[in-house]
Image: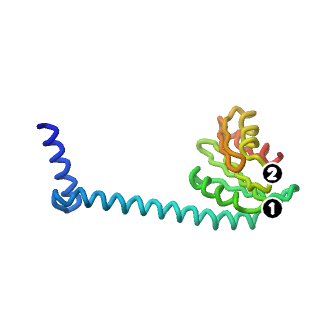
Amino acid sequence: MRRARADFEALTRIAGALSASLDDAPSLVVGQSEQLRAGENERRRLDREIAAYRARALYEAAATNAGGVRVVRHDGMTMDELRNLAQAVVTLPKALLVGTIADPPSLLLATSEDTGIDAGKMLREAVTKLGGRGGGSARVAQGSVPEAGRLAEAIATVLSS
């Protein structure tokens, strides 16, 4: 009986917050949940679209290294933003993305297939020798180092490879 009373009180509070009757509250919650999910999916799609534009601009501004690969550097994003950028960079010809996050000190690499670079292997080698860890696929990899000061060393190792 106590549980039924608690459920009734919870439903009453929900209905009040929705300015709806008790009978209408469940369908309103379902409808709002679906709208929220659709909005979140649209936000993710737009994030990917923005990342594609950003990747193109960074790529066009990037210098080409001795191997003919454009090295795109980007710092100061969240890991999710870097992953979106990485997914866009791997679609560009002869591209390498080196992205970092200061806290926790993390590194993300992404390479287009035509570079011949294995991002997972390159990143793992760069961070493990500094006491860090990481890995990933041949196209996209991420890892971390124990201290922020070691991030520059990891980047230097990647860029000299």
Q: Is residue 32 left or right of residue 1?
A: right
* Mark 2 neighbour density, 10 Å: few (under 14) some (14–19) many (20 or more): few
Q: Mark 2 belongs to which amino acid?
A: Gly
Task: Please name whichever residue, 100 or 69, is drawn nearer the observer in this view of the structure.
Answer: 69
Q: Mark 1 belongs to which amino acid?
A: Ala
| Residue 10, horizontal then vertical, whole percent | 20, 48
Residue placed under numbered mark 2 in the picture: 116
| Residue 119, horizontal then vertical, whole percent | 73, 47
- Quadrant position of residue 7: top left
Q: Is residue 21 left or right of residue 72?
A: left
| Residue 31, horizontal then vertical, whole percent | 31, 61
SS of the residue at dot 1?
loop
Task: Please name whichever residue, 74 or 28, is drawn nearer the observer in this view of the structure.
Answer: 28
Instruction: Mark 2 or mark 1: name the one nearer the start of the chain.
Output: 1
* Mark 1 neighbour density, 10 Å: few (under 14) some (14–19) many (20 or more): few
Q: Nearer the viewer, mark 2 or mark 1?
A: 2
- In the rendered image, the quadrant that contains the C terminus is top right
Vertical arrangement, residue 153 with respect to residue 95, above or below: above
Q: Is residue 82 left or right of residue 117?
A: left
SS of the residue at dot 2?
loop
- Quadrant position of residue 24: bottom left
| Residue 54, horizontal then vertical, whole percent | 64, 65
Real-space Cα distance between discs 2 and 1? 18 Å
Q: How is the image coloured?
A: rainbow
Residue placed under numbered mark 1 in the picture: 63
Vertical arrangement, residue 156 with respect to residue 23, above or below: above
- Quadrant position of residue 125: top right
- In the rendered image, the quadrant that contains the N terminus is top left
